Image (cartoon, rainbow, N blue to C red):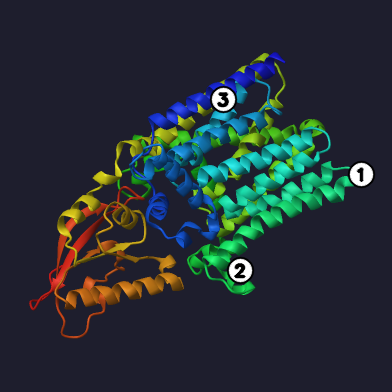
Amino acid sequence: MSVRIGTGRALLAIVVLAAIVYVLTFARSTSHDSLCYFRGVEMGSQEDLSHPHHLIYLPMQKAWFSLWHIIGYDGRVVLPMKVLNLIATCIAVLAFGMMLRFFIRGLILFSAVVSGFAFAYVTWHFASQGEPVPFFLLFSVLSLYLMVRLLVGGGPGWGTAIVLGLVNTAGVLLHQELVLMLPFSACVLWLRSGGEIRGRMLALYLVITVLGVGIPYIAIGSCLAGATSVSELVKWTSGYLRLFEGTGCGRWSNLNVTNIATGVTRAFLGGDALKAYLLGGAARGYRFYVALVPPVGVMLFIGIGMVTLLARLRLVLVRTKSHIVLFVAVAVVFGVAVAWWSPQNRAFWSPVVPCILLLAGMGYASIPSQRSLVVARNTLCVVFTVLLIWGNLTGGILAKHTHQDEEEKILVELEERVRPSDVVILACGRHICLVDYYAPHIHTLEVLTGPRGESPVFRDLREEAVYEAGATLIKGHRVFMSSEVLGPGEGPGAFLSLPAGMEINARPAFNYVDSFSGVIQYQILEINLHSSPPVF
């Protein structure tokens, strides 16, 4: 009993500490997707608010923002959205720790594993962004927690089936990827139900989830998206998948060890400290090897836990066979889905992170209670926690806290230079979202580069940008174009596909640094029609 009280107090202390750290490192530089969500809540139509990939996330944030207005807040949506995401993150950490108490009794090991979840990059970074990832994490953990309780306790009651169905329904409506969690919940419910009520219990769960997910999708797809048939409804519901057709997403060739290892590592650790070296912006001296210490140390700790679990699997399976099967199955199914679709996107690995930590923690918990082994385990736990926090502070958390959106050079420069009649062409990404949100009076056109630009949707965007830029030049106005949208050896004249005889004058206006790499520099070119030869 005293051990459980100790872990309970440790859990509350970690949740409070994590909340304080999240506030002290609150991001003032926001991500590409966060800026899109901010703009959607403030300026989007009702149809824009109900994106099929996260159907109720933006309407929920809109209602939350309205509540802030009622109590007197008169600012923009950035702070309210970030606060709600921070609250969701803290609840996710609490739920993860409550689940972990079923398997780990050692106080230091328990604290290290909970801290591993609280300060994993995918948890910490998104706690103060505007994306739905904290709710993705929260409902992943809540689903696992409810299933663990079913497996630990006796047979489920009707209330358990209802709660599990409601949690899974809310999860899918907040993040479509959580539809993969439904089969696991249904299987656990079926296995733990007994006798004559098994079929009725499963039927109740299925009714809640099918109707809870289906009715909102059908209603919004029909009323707001204008779907008039089943095929149109399916097309709208799968719009996120179709948006990235031909972009490298959804390929079986993505399923390789390198991609999976990179994706999992990115979920645990930010990579800003290594970008300058990996992208050729700095020579690989001793600082490079120092920056390698956190990712190597963190993944080594997890690896040792996994190897220990395998080595002592027969002993561990005696008490926790069903739980290990559940965590492995969830990690494999979500891992394969993410690796197939977009292995580099750390947010998609959210349901895998708690499973990995639970399995590694169970491995360490199985170590015999010999003093020397316990001391070694506790030492590893402390080193792991320190490396994780240090690696993420230097790997992006502090940079996003100290840099501010409104002070970004590209935004400040364009606001000073661009007139209402001018057009700005920028690459798809954070910078165009930054300009669209903080300077909506600037007329921007979006172009996606690289393989993803071959998607039909983005090819149409490029053609639209070329046409509108040409029309702007003909009217005597200026076009500001990022060199990021130009292909290798391509000049602005070739990009704009201007008619023969039309000459342009292009001059560098200013340089800016790519948001993702923090290293690569691009130019903004100021272009107008001119009778003299173009200057590049």
Instruction: Describe residue 392's horizontal placement relative to residue 226 as left or right.
Output: left
- In the rendered image, residue 397, in percent from the top left (x then y), is placed at 39, 37
Q: Amino acid at mark 3?
A: Cys
Q: Quadrant of residue 236?
A: bottom right
Q: Quadrant of residue 303?
A: top right
Residue 390 visible? The answer is: no
Task: Work out whether 446 lies above or below 367.
Answer: below
Residue drawn at the location 34% of the way across and 76% of the way down:
463
Task: Indicate the secondary structure of the residue bearing disc 1.
Answer: loop
Q: Residues within 10 Å of mark 3 (few under 14, many from 20)?
A: many
Residue pointed to by mark 2: 234
Instruction: Describe residue 426's horizontal placement relative to residue 19 as left or right.
Output: left
- In the rendered image, residue 325, in percent from the top left (x then y), is placed at 75, 42
- In the rendered image, residue 140, in percent from the top left (x then y), is placed at 62, 43
Residue 381's mark? Answer: 3
Task: Indicate the secondary structure of the residue bearing disc 2.
Answer: helix
Q: Amino acid at mark 1?
A: Gly
Q: Residues within 10 Å of mark 2 (few under 14, many from 20)?
A: some
- Distance CA(mark 1)–CA(mark 2): 38 Å
Residue 103 visible? The answer is: yes
Task: Work out whether 82 lies above or below 247.
Answer: above
Of the two numbered discs 1 and 2 on the same chain, state the one appearing first in sequence. Answer: 1
Q: Are marks 1 and 3 in contact (CB under 8 Å)?
A: no
Quarter of the image with the N terminus in it: top right
Residue pointed to by mark 1: 195
Residue drawn at the location 34% of the way across and 43% of the way down:
29
Residue drawn at the location 17% of the way across and 56% of the way down:
510
- Distance CA(mark 3)–CA(mark 2): 47 Å
- In the rendered image, residue 383, in percent from the top left (x then y), is placed at 51, 25
